[in-house]
Amino acid sequence: MFWQKDAETMNRAKIKEVQLERLKWTVSRCYNNVPYYKEMMDKAGVTPEKIKTLDDVRRLPLTTKDVLRQNYPFKLFASPKEDVVEIHASSGTTGKPVVGGYTKNDLDLWGHCMARLVVAAGARQDDIAQISFGYGLFTGAFGLHYGLQKVGCMIVPISSGNSEKQIMLMEDFGVTVLIATPSYAVYLSELAKDLGVAGNLKLRLGLFGSEVCTPEMRKQIENNIGIIVTDNYGLTELGGCGVSGECEERDGLHINEDHFLAEIIDPDTGEVLPEGESGELVITPLSKEAFPIFRYRTKDISRLSTEPCRCGRTLIRMDKVVGRTDDMLIIKGVNVFPSQIESVIFTMPHIGPHYQLVLRKERFMDCLEVQVELIDGTLLEKYGELEALENRIKDKLRIVLGIDCGVTLVAPRTITRFEGKAKRIVDLRKA
Amino acid sequence: MSVKQISVFVENKQGALLDITTRLSQHQINIRAVSLADTTRFGIFRLIVDKPDECEKALREEGFTVSITNVLVVKLQDRPGGLSEAVKILSEHGINIDYLYAFITHAINDTCVIVRVGDIEFAEKVLMDNGFTLFSDEDILKI
């Protein structure tokens, strides 16, 4: 099933043709309507006329989140304010939020991009979709809402929170599709089990986003409530969700390539890497009126592939994002992402979901210690069982990370909880 | 004829034990016997108290990792060889001891040893068959 079959199954040459045409349009729009972009392009010696091939995108400077902050709130808008009909913004935990604006056309396009993703994931017109993302400035809830609305699903816009009511409505309405963050979905699935109603739910599909959903988390949710879990991707800076999403094959996320141009760069040098190599994802939206942006550094680590997909889409696929350049740790020369560690901790019984990573140098060697909370008293009969638990966690971490690390059990509620972005890493190597 | 024992997970860091004992004191819980092994990173603090259920609930509510299990409290002869007689019986019946610790009460002038074994009912039977006295929760309350 496709939403816009022609666009989703174009041949590669045609995709590139469409991309080039729209890239030119976007670059002109940036250059002519946004003083910041004109200044930057003049400095780099690029004018819109110099964009003749798709590779010419590399002549444009990269755009970072700082640029968006410096131009807060509306200075990067390319449409007059009276044409902007909606605003969304990031949570802004580390300063002023990133603000995105939408014209009527932008909203329509956003809805179509999302409709493609939800249909690719398996949603159909007769589905009842509960949106448990928080409605508000956050793009997730509205993006899914607009997409599901285009498809014609019955939308239950319950927003987040009030979990028992969430379960009640799921049961009473016969909800078939759940839209939530993976961690909230885990919580809801456990609550449904505790309330003894998991068997009454008609859920069959989960459309998750806004957090890294590790394969382990996905499996746990699938086991708890027997649904298929799919992931989608987007950023406020790029107009929100709708950039890419998994099809039913769940082998990478198809990028809506006619509207988004993707590159992979080396995060240290900024050089573009060939297809198939892993690096930082850089995206240029190609069809935005109000809030165009070029070569946005997502800080997300991914990989691109134009290999044909069994679903029939010709759109390029990106790997599930495993981590951000910000979070990546290099330990004994190996790249380690906290999300990998999280995926192990998540599946282990007896311990809680909170953790802290402590990095030290011992005899010139990097040492990683993972602290986890022991929350279950059943192992307290034998000291040896606690040691065995530590060893089991250690073994699993070695398999997933490829390096040895230490594991320490600590008492419950001793690891700091964070309301915003968690700071789980204590790096003592430089100290 | 067994007695409820509380086990609490305790990190090897300053103040960890104080946290637990402070809670017990706040809840007016009286300790009869304790055991805490010398380990490097964490330990298991074991307690026999006058109100085990209340103690477990209080510690759990305070966020500690706690379990409650049954152990045998065996009365011994307070003379050389007293402990050996009890251990001999268990050994002869192939009963493995996970851990044990002792206490002496001035109230009833008894020497007791707290024993944790795998098959508690069997151990209870062989000890009683061989003339040992075992304490119950009610006995502990009377101390």
Image (tube, coloured by chain):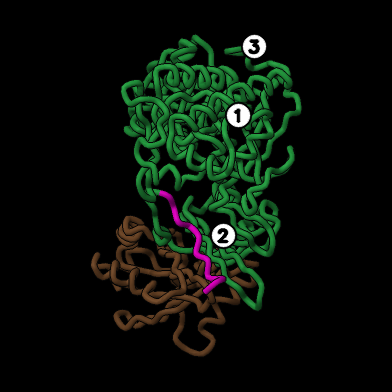
Instruction: Tell me which chain the residue with mark 3 is part of.
Output: A
Instruction: Tell me which chain the residue with mark 1 is part of.
Output: A
Instruction: Tell me the amino acid under the disc marked 1.
Output: Glu
Q: Is residue A50 magenta?
A: no
Q: Is residue A134 left or right of residue A230?
A: left
**Considering only vertical position in the picture, is A71 above or below A391?**
above
- Are there few (<14), some (14-19), or many (20+) residues within 10 Å of tag 2? few
The mark tally for this picture is 3
Callout 2: SS: loop
Residue at 38% x, 69% y: name it. B48
Q: Colour in which chain A is shown?
A: green
Magenta span covers which residues?
A: A421-431
Q: Position of residue A149 (x, y in %)?
A: 44, 14
Q: Position of residue B16 (x, y in %)?
A: 39, 72
Question: What residue would you read off at disc 1?
Answer: A49
Q: Is residue B50 left or right of residue A359?
A: left
Question: Label 1 to label 3, Cα distance in Å?
Answer: 29 Å
Question: What residue would you read off at disc 3?
Answer: A6
Question: What residue would you read off at disc 2?
Answer: B119
Instruction: Tell me which chain the residue with mark 2 is part of.
Output: B
Instruction: Tell me the amino acid under the disc marked 3.
Output: Asp
